[in-house]
Image (tube, helix red, strand yellow):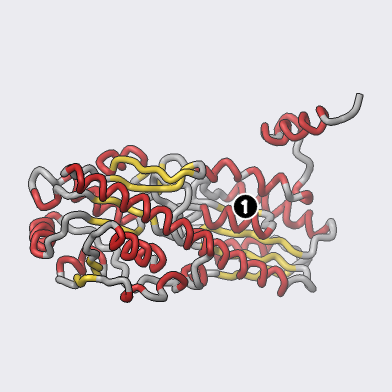
Amino acid sequence: MNTAARAAVRLGLDHGFTMLGVYGGFPGLLDGNVRELSWDDVEGWVGDGGAELGTRRDIPSIEQLYSLGRAIESNRIDALLIIGGFNAYLAAHELVTERDRYPAFKIPMICVPASIDNNLPGSELSIGADTALNSAVGALDAIKQSAAASRRCFVAEAMGRRCGYLTLMSGIATGAERVYLNEEGLTLKKLAQDSARMVESFRSGRKLYLVIRNERASENYTLDVLAKIFSEESEGLYDVRQAQIGHLQQGGDPTAFDRIMATKLVAHALDLLSDQLDAGTYHSSYVGLVEGRITHHRLERMDEELDLRARRPLNQWWMGLRDAIGLVNKNLGVIPPQEVPDFGQTVAQAASAREPD
């Protein structure tokens, strides 16, 4: 967040804008916590974790919209650059849809994705997700090292709410044997099968078994319940321990990738704002990284891309990587050739093509 805010201030000043910082999100705007930011005010923010401007997840209510419009007018705000997560996007969408009733909202608004959950539309990655993933992987690696000398199953829980990005990616990066995602759900039948595989793996000589649970994978099969189930089925072959990574994933200095991506996204957003202000129009968008390119989509149509109940995009690119967990785990059995995904067949065909006659 700090890296993005710093880039916004300095690149905005280069555009010739007067940059105002709103402290505490939309509630801060309602309370008048707004002040002009200069080049020096954001000195040192590039490598700092957290958010100097503060974060608030409140979405303005219908009763607050009039006051919010007055706050925009009294502060002489000509455009809004909104850096935030799911609630920030919903709030911006609410303002856009209420323009007919509140003329003060007829200004350009651009949303920049910033959420460790990586659950925002129009972008494959959100600012902060890479930093959170690195923190999770570091914690899980330490957990695995602590169990290296014993026969142990570790059940860990990653953040992400109803989006399993952090869980799946950290599972792939740390060689987890199982991951449980909200997107797939969790049943007693599945747990029974996984418990049987786990017992067989330890009987075959395995010393460590890592299971990672998305924090919203199941309402009933909590971290503690999973650990107790696996322990009950262990038959004395191994110990079971649980670890909740928790807010470790929200801390730490931003990675180089996050810093660079934040700067690119903000630069694109400011270019869009500049074009709208020059043209005297007020189209609004949300920017993102898609297939290696910075792009944008119309904010007015954002709801078409969302699963509002689960608070995530309808299409999540990383879900196609779920099979990687089973494919790289040799102790979970051999996958029949007909069940191997297309990318495995493509590799085999490419290798065959290189063989000499």
Would residue 152 be found to the left or right of residue 180 on screen?
right
Q: Is residue 219 visible?
A: no
Q: Where the C terminus falls, by quadrant?
A: top right
User: What's under tag 1, amino acid-wise?
Assistant: Leu
Q: Where the N terminus falls, by quadrant?
A: bottom left
Would residue 220 be found to the left or right of residue 275 on screen?
right
Tally of marks? 1
- Give the residue at x 19% y 72%: 33
Would residue 252 be found to the left or right of residue 145 on screen?
left
Residue 81 vs residue 102, the one in the foreground: 81
Residue 177 vs residue 78, the one in the foreground: 78
Q: Residue 18 is drawn in which quadrant?
A: bottom left
- Give the residue at x 73% y 68%: 152
- Give the residue at x 44% y 73%: 48
Would residue 22 be found to the left or right of residue 166 on screen?
left
Q: Residue 11 is drawn in which quadrant?
A: bottom left
- Near mark 1 (Cα within 10 A), the count class, few <14, some 14-19 or many ≥20, is some
Q: Which residue sits furthest top?
A: 357
Residue 278 percent across, percent down from the top left: 20, 46
Q: Which residue is mark 1?
A: 191
Residue 170 vs residue 107, the one in the foreground: 107
Residue 85 percent across, percent down from the top left: 36, 57
Residue 195 percent across, percent down from the top left: 68, 55
- Give the residue at x 47% y 47%: 124
Secondary structure at numbered mark 1: helix
Q: Which residue sits furthest right?
A: 357
Residue 2 percent across, percent down from the top left: 39, 68
Q: Is residue 333 visible?
A: yes
Where 310 falls versus 83 (above or below)?
above
